Amino acid sequence: MKKTFGMLVVLLMVFSPFAVAQKKGGKSSHTVGHGYIPAHGPAPARRGAQRPAATQKPNYRDAAGHPNAPHVHTNGQWVGHSTGPNDPHYHLAHPWQHGHFTGGFGRGHVWRLAGGGPSRFWFSGFYFSVAPYDVGFCVNWLWGSDQIVIYQDPDHVGWYLAYNVRLGTYVHVMYLG
């Protein structure tokens, strides 16, 4: 009896955090980050999407507990990727000047950051830099250990999207080779 009771206590201790993290419908209560990896990148922006003001960054905090940075909800919604191909923040005079990234895109290709910072970071022999406009959105990234996933950007020629699995945020990145 004591052995059975002891096993029950251990099982409750192990599985209690999972039960607390669940909400109605069996889905996690976290709607951003925490290991979620989107199945695909964002859809192209709708035609005629509004461009951001040149002097002020938009507020991306669309719900309590969400970051004020471009992020992805666990339902696959990419928040903040709506400015379209004419966004001046992501215009490049020489797109793809260092070639194209060939390491693989999306959920099946999770990479661990190996060092650097926004101006130049790397993993598995691939080098990238964060778009100047997006540098403030990756201040909480751990450049020596976070996992990221690279997605193709359907709107901004020459840019990719680096999604941080831990935080659920993403930034525009340029492939450096």
Image (spheres, rainbow, N blue to C red):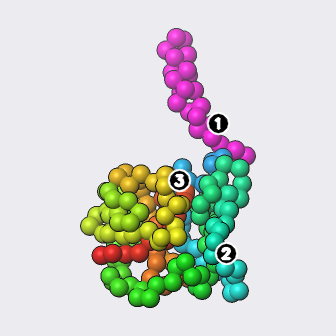
Disc 2 residue type (three-letter)? Ala
Q: Position of residue 19 (x, y in %)?
A: 63, 37
Considering only order in the chain, which callout, 3 or 2, is on the residue closer to the N terminus? 2
Q: Look at the numbered disc 1 and give the secondary structure of its residue.
A: helix
Position of 84 relative to 140 (above/below):
below
Q: Please tell me whether residue 47 is drawn above or below residue 62 in the rendered image.
A: below
Residue at far top of view: 2
Location of mark 1 (residue): 20
Please state if 61 lies on the left or on the right of 127 as rendered: right
Q: Image point 52% across, 64% down: which residue?
A: 170
Q: Which residues are magenta?
A: 1-27
The crowd level at tag 1 (other Cα within 10 Å; few <14, some 14-19, many 20+) is: few
- The residue under the point 48% across, 70% down is 132
Q: Nearer the viewer, residue 25 or 130?
A: 130
Residue 129: quadrant of the picture: bottom left
Q: Give the residue at mark 3.
A: 167
- Nearer the camera: disc 2 or disc 3: 2
Where residue 122 appears, x then y in whole percent? 32, 64
**Is residue 107 among what the camera can see?**
no
Q: Residue at x 53, y 60 (%)?
A: 137
Left or right for 176, reference 13: left
Q: Amino acid at mark 1?
A: Val
Q: Which residue is mark 2?
A: 53
